Image (cartoon, rainbow, N blue to C red):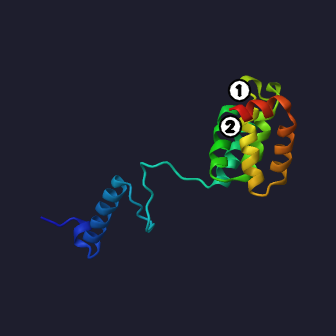
Amino acid sequence: MQASPLKSHPTGSHLALLALCTALALARGVSVIGDAQAADLTSPPTHSPEQVYQMALEARTERDYPAMLRLLREAGEAGEVRAQELLASVLLADPGLHGNAIATDPCEARRWALRAAAQGSEVGKHQRALIHGMRDASRSCAAG
């Protein structure tokens, strides 16, 4: 009985063991390329506030306004000042700009403008002054 060429070669058993370990590692979702911190495949990828803001701009380009609004809120909550500025603008915009996908909400717009202004944003300060000058918005936001 003749031994298989793989087993008779001095490194053959090592190659077989390496192949088995690689297959097991891949089955468990572990990187075999040397990544010391293999990604947890069960958790969603995390993005920086800047990246989330950029994804919101992409959603706007694609006219996916609900996604844009969700992403802007996420980035704004994380402190991305440009998202806060854009949220204030979007929420003040005429419904004709985004259709019925985004309802005008001067009170929420005011909150985002205040957050942007608190970070030193000149745009946020201008938006805050603009909203303050809107008689109906000032009354309804103060009451709510």
For the C terminus, give its image quadrant. top right
Q: Let me know if residue 17 appears in the view.
A: yes
Helix, strand or loop for disc 1: helix
Which amino acid is tagged 2?
Answer: Leu
Helix, strand or loop for disc 2: helix
Tell me what residue is drawn at x 80 percent, y 49 percent.
Answer: 124
**Residue 113 percent across, percent down from the top left:** 76, 45
Tell me what residue is drawn at x 74 percent, y 54 percent.
Answer: 118
Which amino acid is tagged 1?
Answer: Ala
Q: Nearer the viewer, residue 55 or 83?
A: 83
Gap in angstroms between the C-alphas marked 1 and 2: 9 Å
The mark found on residue 6 in the picture is: none
Q: Earlier in the sequence, mark 1 or mark 2?
A: 2
Tell me what residue is drawn at x 69 percent, y 38 percent.
Answer: 68
**Residue 28 percent across, percent down from the top left:** 34, 54
Q: Which residue is mark 1?
A: 101
Q: Quadrant of residue 72?
A: top right
